[in-house]
Structures are given as C-alpha cells and as structure tokens.
Image: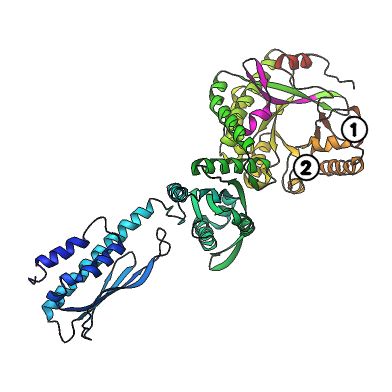
Amino acid sequence: MNNRICSDNYKSFIRGINSDSCSITEIADYTRNSMHIIKDSIHLGRLEALIDAKPNEIDRHGFKGNEMLFQSPDGYSPSLYRMEFKTESGVSIVMNAYPMKGYEWDEKERDDIYFLCSNFFALYERARLINVMKKAAFIESQSGALNLNGVMNRAGKLSAQGKLGDFTVAFLNIKNFKLINKNIGMRQGDNIIRCFVDDIYGFKHPDEMIGRLGGDNFILVMKDERVDSYLQHLNPLKLNYYKNGERNELNMYFRIGLFDMKDGDAMGEAITNASTALGVSRMEGNNDIIWFDHDMREERLNEQQTSYNFNQALINREFVVYYQPKVNLSTNCLCGCEALVRWLKNGKLIPPASFIPALERDGSISELDFYVFENVCRDIRDWKDSGIDPVTVSVNFSKNHLRSDDFSDRILSILDRYHIKHKYIEVELTETACYEDFNRLKGFLDEMRKNDIVVSIDDFGTGYSSLSLLKDLKVDIIKLDQSFIRSIDNKENNETTEVVIRNIIHMVDELSMEIIAEGVETSEEAEFLKEVSCNMAQGFLYDKPMTHNDFEVLLKGNRKYIK
C-alpha cells in the first residue's frame, strides 16, 4: 500500500469520520471540512458522491442526492476516475474523482483514491444501517407504519414542544378484514394493509402519524382541524389490488374510536380512551364512529373489574341459572323455557346487562355460556332421575363460539356426558352472527340438524340481514324481538306494526319454521299474537325468570296458564 495512505494525516482523517456516533450527514460534513488534510498528498482536485438509496419498509423515503465532498479552488483536471459501490439492499454510491489541475494519477495513485472512496462508502453504509436500525425500533416492518414505540416516541417530541393538545387520536379497526383475507388471500390481504398505510402517508401532514398495533388495528394521530377530512377520506377508502393479473377495487370501511387530546394528556391514556370508544362502537353495531366521553371511562373500569372477578366467581359458582317459561299460545300451556344467567354476588343479584357486554368484549362469555349449558344439562338430568318430565330448554350462545372449530363437538359431548336426549335442548344464537360468520353459522346449523338439536335465532328483526336470514339459512325457530311487541300498544304505530308482524309470521310459517314472541307483557299483546297465528310467547305476562326450585314446582303442576 502506498505510504501516502499510511501517513499520519490520512489516519487522522479516517479517525475523524470513523465513529459510531457519526450520522450520514456528519460523515459528509466532516469529509468536506477535513479533506484539506490529505488533498495534497493524493493530488485531489474534486470529489463527489452520487448517492441512491432505494425506499423500503423501514425508510419509506430513501435518499437520492449529490454530495460535493471536495473541490479545489485552483480547479481540477478533466480526467474522471469513476467508481461505483453497491449493496444487496439496493444502495448505490457512484464516486467521481478528479486529480488536481494539470496532474494525472498513475495506477498506484488510483489505488489510493479507490481505497479512500471505498472507506467513505463503508462508513456511509455503516451510518445508514445504524440509522435504519434506529428507525426499525419504531417501525412495523410489514406495513411501514409506526409501531407503538414509534407512536409514543413521536408523541413525546410533540409533547415536549407543547403541541400534543392540538391533536386527536383515532383508534381504527378495518371492518370484516378476516372476510377480506378469506376472499382475496392472505398475501393480497397484507398488500391491502400496505396500500392503506401508503394512502394515509400520502394524505397526512408531516406532524401527523399512523401506527399499527397489530392485525387490522391502527392508531391515527391527526390535527384537530383535519378530523372531518380524515373521516370523509376513510369511509369508504377506495383501494386497488391485483388478483390473477386483474385490477380490482376494494371499498374499505372502518370502525373508529376518537379521543380529543388536551394539553397535559398522556398519549398512552389517549390511546386507551380511543380504544374504549371503539369498543362501544363494536357493541352498538349501528354506529361506526364514536367519540370518547368520561362516562365510558367509568364503564371501562367496571368492565375491567368484571373481567378481573369473573374466573373466581365461576369457581365460587356465583353464577345462577334462572328459567323463564315459554307458553304455547293455542293451549296456554307451558311448552319450554329459556335459561338465563344471573350473578349472585354478596347476596345481591347482578342483572346480565351489567356484566354480559364486558364478558363479550374480553371473550370470557364463551366460558360462561358453557357453564350455563352444563348447569342446564345437570338440572334436566336431575329432573329426569326424579321422575319429572322436563320441557325443551333454550340456552344462549354468543356469536363468538362460531369462531371455534369444536363448538358443535363441545355441545354434543356435554349432552352425552349427562345422557340428555337432544329434544330437550334448543341452541339460541343472536342474529348478528349471521352476517359476520355466515359460512360457519351455516356449517353449525347443519351439524345441529344432523343431531336433531333445535336452533333458534334471537332478536330477529333488529339487524339488516333479517330477510336474507330467512332466505339463506334453515333455522327451526325465529324469536321476534320485543321492540316489535312494544309497538303493538303504541296507538300511533299500531297499524304499521301489526302489518309488519303479520307478514313476518306468515313468511316464517311458509318456510316451515316456528316463531316465538319475546317480551309479552299485556293481554292485548297476547291476543293480537294469537290472532296472527304466532306459535309461542314469553314474557312477564306469564312469568318472570324463575329460580330452579320455583321452575321445578311449575314442572310438577298442571303447566297451564290462564290469562
């Protein structure tokens, strides 16, 4: 190696730029400012670097530019020495070097220049990789959005500048993304996520941000005055994707929880509040955009307490099964009942509305449903063993069960364990399950029918898929929602309601299904339902939900209601 490269001046020059703390900008600046140390020994007239770093998932912008590292005020020779350095990651640096004016490099001097430039490239690439690694700690690599650390880091900087109170936090969930994945494939689904993030990067302002919290859940941090623009942009968001070489268009819809930040608010709490609002949106079903209010915070704390106490309550058998009779409207006789759960805590009964929504959200409802089902099977077994003839008992199951492959098997296994004839059990599902998990629901219904187990759909008429339900799914019993029944006594809506109920009952009858009206409270309601040939009724007119012992007394009696 030439003595010039081994000189103290060159070593000093390299030490100046060879530091772990050097950024790309610092390396270029130091090279420009320090080139005078070695320029004379290598007869350098001009040195420039043409840098082209392609964008990637971590560095969305990449870098392309020309860095003039040195130019002698005395000019330079036109003899260009061009060197190109590349990496497998797509980084290319072209180094253009010229000798000082009136000078020509020999072969050994060209080797010295090449050594100098290769050092610059190596140091540049190291600094770039260090920068990428720092960014990677804050980026969700699959989509290119910030991860939670990235959101918190950027929020910390905004907070330090006193700007965080100018922003609104949105917690977004892509509606029916599992169905999208199923229809277009997982790979295309990942591409759709990237397209969505790219769209937001093109729409957002520099100080706004998008973060991915996993799956189809995202955080948007947007300026207060831009919230309406975002909401208009997002619902629906039109994206293009390619499948089998063909261009397709997708309308993407979102559920969104929003929290308006104030000065002094912490980002972590803001995300939690926006998430709480999103949870409310999920439960309401008919409102995709919800703003957080502080009543939700109290509800969230209560829900967390419910979730925390649930497992121990299950062990302590604090959940008690009640039975509400069903009545045949033609005979006024007991024809079945519905199993309902109550929480007996510290001697007080807690109604379902106070704990069921929380258990639905955290998934514990599945355990509770099977707890109730097993208690029902145990009661039926006890009644049979005591010589009491039971009636068919309907047991509620959350739509969450339809995501489980062993749903049917668990039901059949418990029935077998207690030696219960299948005619004594009716599985009751909520109508909301029909749209989100249609194929699973259809498969489940087929399995129940094959095993002679009756299935009913609860709250019929409250969702937008009611008529589709009648057309596409073969269920045994339709449960008419009590909101229809309440309207019978409403003088203003009475005529319209009667027409609707009459036609629903007629359609159900034509399809060889049965119908039961829930929430019947007055004799007028019962008489109208008889007139329109409704099969069964359930409600306070006949009986409130009853304890096991009280219902057993009813089973032992004549089972006749006189109203």
Numbered circle sitting on residue 461: 2
Disc assigned to residue 158: none
Q: Magenta region: which residues?
A: 335-357
- Closest to the camera, between mark 2 and mark 1, is 2
Residue 433, compared with residue 231, is above or below; it is above
| Residue 316 picture location, percent across and down | 56, 18
Position of the N terminus by quadrant? bottom left
| Front position in the image: 504 or 225 | 225
Q: State whether residue 52 is above or below residue 502.
A: below
**535 in magenta:** no
Residue in view at x 77 percent, y 25 percent: 336
Q: Position of residue 111 (x, y in %)?
A: 14, 75
For the stretch drawn in magenta, the main secondary structure is: strand
Q: Residue at x 59, y 36 (%)?
A: 361
Specify the amino acid type for callout 1. Lys
Q: Which quadrant is home to the C terminus?
A: top right
